[in-house]
Every structure is written in C-alpha cells, then in structure tokens.
Amino acid sequence: MTTVVPADCTLELVSETAVGQYRFGPDGSVSVTIGMKDGPVCAPAWVYRVVSDTSIELWREEERLELWTEIQRVDDTLHVTCRGSRLTFRISP
C-alpha cells in the first residue's frame, strides 16, 4: 500500500500533555496509543485510508475518527493538520 505516512515506523506526538503513538502497517492497519500524560490511555486498533498525496483518514469499523491533512515529512518529523490543529510527530523505527 502506498502511503503518505511511513509504514513500519512509530510516530510519537510531540506534546506536553497528550500521548499519541501511531504505528502504520503496510496493510492499512494502525496500532494506536492515545490519551493524556500521567492519565488514562487506550490502545485501539484502527485502519487508515489514503485520501491524497497529503492526507489520510483513520477509521474504526465504519466510523472515521480522524482526518490528517497537509501531511509533510521533514527529516525525522511528520507535520499534519488534524481538527484544525497543526501536530508534530517524531518518526522512529
């Protein structure tokens, strides 16, 4: 599967308060850990769909949970827009 996000790498959200780790598989699966630092977290399994060269959708069953647009990779970081906010992720193997 061609994707605008790096497959088989971990994306870690750069945030003072939120936890966000995403691991995109080449088969369209996404292993996710989300929540709050020093608070509750959950680890759902999602799928993703490529919408364009710079955007993807993240889904659980029949519900679209997130839309990432304006995806841009710069060295070992990934920048995306989600719900009107610009997010930065560190990319690691």
Image (spheres, rainbow, N blue to C red):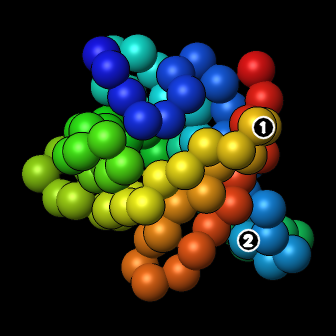
Q: Position of residue 43 (x, y in %)?
A: 57, 46
Residue placed most toward the observer, 27 or 60: 27
The quarter of the rendered structure image containing the N terminus is top left
Q: Position of residue 64 (x, y in %)?
A: 22, 59
Give left or right: position of 49 versus 37.
left
* Residue located 48% across and 69% down the image: 81
Residue at image mark 1: 76
Q: Position of residue 13 (x, y in %)?
A: 72, 57
The quarter of the rendered structure image containing the C terminus is top right
Please tell me whether mark 1 sits on a helix, a strand or a loop: loop
Q: Amino acid at mark 2?
A: Ala
Give left or right: position of 37 versus 10.
right
User: In this picture, is 63 found above or below 22?
Assistant: below
Q: Quadrant of residue 11?
A: top right
Query: Total number of numbered labels?
Result: 2
* Residue located 70% across and 44% down the image: 74
The residue carrying pointer 2 sits among few (fewer than 14), some (14 to 19) or many (20 or more) residues within 10 Å by Cα, namely some
* Residue located 78% across and 29% down the image: 92
Give left or right: position of 16 versus 69.
right
Q: Quadrant of residue 15?
A: bottom right
| Residue 81 visible in the current orientation | yes
Q: Which mark is residue 18?
A: 2
Q: CA distance from mark 2 to mark 1?
A: 20 Å
Could you tell which of marks 2 and 1 lies nearer the N-terminus?
A: 2
Q: Which mark is residue 47?
A: none
